[in-house]
Image: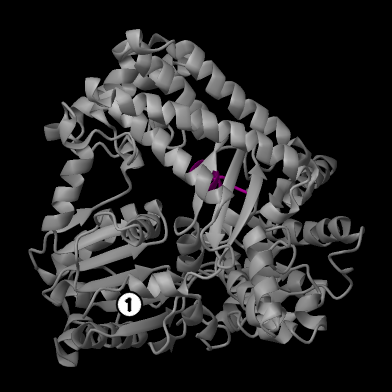
Amino acid sequence: MFKDDLASIFAEDGPFAQGAPGYRLRPAQLEMAQAIAEAIRTRGTLVAEAGTGTGKTWAYLVPAILSGGKTIISTGTRTLQDQLFKRDLPKVRKALSVPVAVALLKGRSNYVCHYHLERLEEDDRGFRSRTEAAQLRKIQLFAKQSQTGDKVELSAVPENADIWNRVSSTRENCLGQDCPHVRECFVMKARKQAQEAEVLVVNHALFMADLALREEGIVDLLPQADTVVFDEAHQLPDTATRFLGESVSTHQLLDLARDMAAVGLAQAREALNWSEAGRQLEHAVREWRLSAAAIEQMPGRKATAEALPDADGFHAALDVLIERVGEAADRLKKIEEKHPDLAAQAKVAQTLLGKLGQWLKPEDPQGCVRWVEMTHQGMRLHSAPLSVAEAFSRCRRKEQAWVMVSATLSVQGNFTHFTRQLGLWEPQVAKWESPFDYASQGLLFVPSDMPLPSSPAFNERFIDTLMPLLDACQGGALVLCTTLRAVDIFADSLVRHFEARGWDWPLLRQGQTSRHLLLERFRTEAHAVLVGSASFWEGVDVPGDALRLLAIDKLPFAPPDDPVIEARLRSCRERGGNPFAEFQLPEAAIALKQGAGRLIRTERDWGVLMVGDVRLVDKPYGRRLWRGLPPFARTRDLQVALDFYTDRMAEVDKPSTD
């Protein structure tokens, strides 16, 4: 694949121009495609930052498709995965007229399992509400008609509905070749297509799950490939940390107690009093949960293994629980040959037993952090590696090209923070700026009279400053908060201010309904204001007048109550490093750039970015943060921001001279 070939493809009179109305040549997109093609040819590692509007998706799809080898494309989320597979890939494949085989593969929890669906149909106690009974009927019909079994295709049942957990399988309770439905298994079909495809689309969670299994010496989930492209690559360090660690919850343990009793009664009634065994295990789980009640009052409702408030009571209850789970595993193991369900439950019990034991006695206490988290559903044990660099770098197969792309990988053009996290010691790095005219399209406003975020007066002053901006832009505002608590504080305050002014505007807040529905309402309803936290800082694409004001309350420094971050900062300090400069500041810079990137999504977008945290300007380190943002015009004067809206609104309302 030569540079001239790519130049003709992306040319003004090339195949894209002929098939896509409004297409135009973007030099940065062509340069990026050529750099990716070279990385594929040399089996190298390319870390590429491409600003919004560069066209990075087509820039990696074209050389990947034309390379002739097998390519795995890993995206940040399942939503982006579906978008890439259903929208972008078909367009590129059609434009290139290349009959390349493509496939989509997700984790098994996304697919209906015929066997577990059948089991739920037969379990009268399986429904927790009338809604679930209605959902089951829809899933039954879907399973008969669907070619993929992918739950995203059944919009009538929300993706986060609890019933999906009971009609899908896990690695532990899958019957594999012993399943009576193995020939029609949606997971098996998807994996077969993945093996045969030349371009396979996965997500980071599945890629890391595959890596974690390989670290355990278990068979691979994903096929071998010549090239791996990581889109939204900035998410890789966090995803790797999550999947290379372990977790076990009271929810899983209570499910084991319930399922063991049900399966035992159905398949081996004579072997044991299964109802009593299930009750004993359930009692041990609840007693263990009570032993950790004091954690509810701790910051973030979390406690590290070294800082448990009642360590003796916690470990005593955990010892009893481990004994009960061990008994369950032994009993099920002895009779597992009687029925596949018994074998599956034996496997679940053994897996949970192993996780509990591993948490209690970690093999590498210096290299991991362990903590307990209280949740609304119960309690969860976690362990995570302090560094994922070694494990991640090992997952690269011999003579495999790696391409990592995102709009936010560097801090002022320096990629070191990202590459060191993933053990990429000598990659090729490249950066392409956005083609947008940020200086005229956007304005960065940092109020000069705001108190520090630690001040009790901060929240009220933030809203007082925000209100005239909302009035000027007439809604179309996204308020990004650094904590869920701030979401509620600001949303409640805005409700009062809206009522006082008589504004009947849609006020949307995170948690009100699903993220997808909130964004859909925000895009379509006039004067909408959306208040959200972490999950809205990235992956939000709202072009046009639906978003004219982006307000960020505070600089997104990682919360001090996060056990993994706390342990990494401590480790950095112990080796003589500067944790603020080496970790906290680069992380905040990347997160802030991600959040700010929500405002300008096309060449026609415009708006104000308000950051309520004066440290962005007043602190010496603030320069490193705002220099990493798009080159907006800047002001500290509220009136300048209001005038920006006045001028822009006048341009919008100006009669056309066409």
Judging depth in this view, the residue of 170 and 318 nearest the camera is: 318
Image quadrant assignment for residue 619: bottom right
Residue 189 is left or right of residue 647, and the answer is: left
The stretch drawn in magenta includes residue 637: no
**Residue depicted at 71% across the width and 61% down the height:** 559
Residue 413 position, x and y percent, is 53, 88
Judging depth in this view, the residue of 64 and 168 nearest the camera is: 168
Number of numbered discs: 1
Q: Main secondary structure of the magenta part?
A: helix
Colouring scheme applied when the structure was drawn: one colour
Image quadrant assignment for residue 140: top left
Q: What range is drawn magenta here?
A: 515-527
Residue 622 position, x and y percent, is 74, 82
The residue carrying mark 1 is 403
Rendered view: 48 above or below 255? below
**Residue depicted at 67% across the width and 85% down the height:** 624
